[in-house]
Image: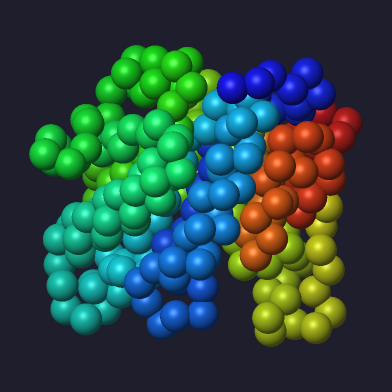
Amino acid sequence: MEQDNDLAYRRILLKLSGEALMGDRPSGIDPEVLAGITDEIIHVHAMGVEIALVVGGGNIFRGTTGTAEGIDRVTGDHMGMLATLINSLALQNALEQKKVTTRVLSAIEINQVAEPMIRRRALRHLEKGRVVILAAGTGNPYFTTDSAAALRAMELKSEVLLKATKVDGVYTADPMKDPDARLLPKVNYLEVLEKGLRVMDTTAISLCMDNNLPIVVFNIADPRNIRRIVQGEQVGSVVGEPQNA
């Protein structure tokens, strides 16, 4: 793995939603989308970047949806954790078919298919150049995979949290509903919380704010955005401390 001396970040945590893997399908995983994302991960990894991934499960099952359909919230969230594990195994398979060594670490015990999430073990895998895929959220109900991504980014000493979305960044309003919504290239944590901007849930934002971890929100429709970000280009929106802080 070659080292690029011009990299802005050398260890990243990439948060992928389950929906990002669907493409135009109503549910499940689109093989072409999966191939595009994994090809970019491989490219960035080859640049010398240590990569951890947290993936959601909304393309298969979402706990809050199950609750609306009469499923107990805790049970629904556990079902959602298993959905993230399915996506994690799909990512692992796609990466390893392309000769990239990976490890799936799960926050719930499922030893036949994944290692347990042990911080020191995850750090060691990163140091050895393996792509680490973190499944099952935090292992606790009522916490989203956004919160899991913020938590794991802190635990693994990531330099940035990359939040992949279907829009170009953080907007003043929902760009799908408001034609006057403006893209905000830079925004601080408190603005996100006070204005209710749709970035990540409040627990995740607060955790990043308390630990001064920058978040880059970007559009995964062009997977090459990941390499642009690690090379220091302005892509999407950066959530961080105020400029005068």
Asked whether the viewer can see residue 112, the reply is: yes
Q: Nearer the viewer, residue 3 or 104?
A: 3
- Quarter of the image with the N terminus is top right
Q: Nearer the viewer, residue 139 or 40?
A: 40
Q: Position of residue 155 (x, y in %)?
A: 44, 24
User: On screen, 197 above or below 108?
Assistant: below
User: On screen, 183 above or below 243?
Assistant: below
- Quarter of the image with the C terminus is top right
Q: Is residue 110 left or right of residue 91?
A: left
Asked whether the viewer can see residue 137, the reply is: no
Q: Nearer the viewer, residue 67 or 108?
A: 108
Q: Quadrant of residue 37?
A: bottom right
Q: Nearer the viewer, residue 35 or 21?
A: 35
Task: Identify the residue shown where x is 42% and y is 62%.
Answer: 18
User: On screen, 117 above or below 64?
Assistant: above
User: On screen, 25 above or below 93?
Assistant: below
Q: Position of residue 61 (x, y in %)?
A: 29, 68
Task: Identify the residue shown where x is 55% and y is 26%.
Answer: 50
Q: Is residue 228 left or right of residue 164?
A: right
Task: Identify the residue shown where x is 34% and y is 54%.
Answer: 90
Q: Position of residue 24 (x, y in %)?
A: 51, 80
Q: Is residue 41 left or right of residue 63?
A: right
Task: Identify the residue shown where x is 22% and y is 31%.
Answer: 115
Q: Position of residue 141 (x, y in %)?
A: 25, 51
